[in-house]
Amino acid sequence: MDKGAVPEESILQAQQSIVDSFQCLGNWMARYEYLIDLGRSLPDFPEKWRTQANRLHGCQAQVWMISELRDHKLFFQARSDSAIVTGLLALLMKVYSGRLPEEILSHPPDFLQAIELEQHLSPNRANGLFHMMERIRLEAQAALDAEAAKAKP
């Protein structure tokens, strides 16, 4: 897995940065273009990672996500066969990748409501976004559980 960098800003700062960016973009066509551009900025996601084990189910588009725990922080990489969904993944990666699992679990994706994203997605994409966020939370909980199990004598 790519050795993703630890974010320099807090989760709350990352969420606010996204809200600010969306507010600067006037209409939803510009916002969709911005999402697509964000998706293009994600690191490569090799074919070997595009497996059934890494696939998120419940999304209309094909979505793959992997995670790795390094130095107590959880790093994610993801990709979709849909440009807009890849942009949604980029938003989630910006906020949640490189964070402590307990940070992830204690910071819900409130920024999605603030940018009114869910109201502008099709029901299928909104459902897929829910499943992407759920997978991030499940990975964070699994990482916490694994670390707690290691700490027990």
Image (cartoon, rainbow, N blue to C red):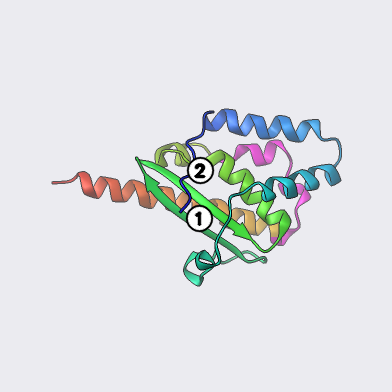
Callout 2 crowding tier (Cα within 10 Å): few <14, some 14–19, many ≥20: many
In percent of width and height, residue 74 lies at 43, 45
Residue 75 located left or right of residue 21: left
Q: Which residue is mark 1?
A: 135
Q: Which residue appears at 68% of the width and 56% of the height?
A: 85
Residue 118 colored in magenta in the image: yes
In percent of width and height, residue 70 lies at 37, 44
Residue 47 located left or right of residue 142: right
User: Which range is magenta?
Assistant: 108-124
Tell me the quarter of the picture where residue 111 sits.
Answer: top right
In percent of width and height, residue 8 lies at 52, 29
Q: In front: mark 2 or mark 1?
A: 2
* Residue nearest the viewer, comparing 70 with 17: 70
Total labels drawn:
2
Residues marked 2 and 1 touching at CB (< 8 Å): no
Vertical arrangement, residue 108 with respect to residue 84, above or below:
above
Callout 1 crowding tier (Cα within 10 Å): few <14, some 14–19, many ≥20: some
Q: Amino acid at mark 1?
A: Arg
Vertical arrangement, residue 83 with respect to residue 11, above or below:
below
Could you tell me which secondary element the residue under label 1 belongs to? helix
Q: Which residue appears at 21% of the width and 44% of the height?
A: 151
Q: Indicate the quadrant containing the N terminus: top left, top right, bottom left or bottom right.
A: bottom left
Question: Spatial distance from mark 2 to mark 1, Cα to Cα?
Answer: 13 Å
Q: Which residue appears at 62% of the width and 51% of the height?
A: 89
**Most distant residue in the bottom direction:** 52
Residue 10 colored in magenta in the image: no
In percent of width and height, residue 127 lies at 65, 58
Q: Amino acid at mark 2?
A: Ser
Could you tell me which secondary element the residue under label 2 belongs to? loop
Q: Which residue appears at 64% of the width and 29% of the height?
A: 16
Q: Which residue is mark 2?
A: 97
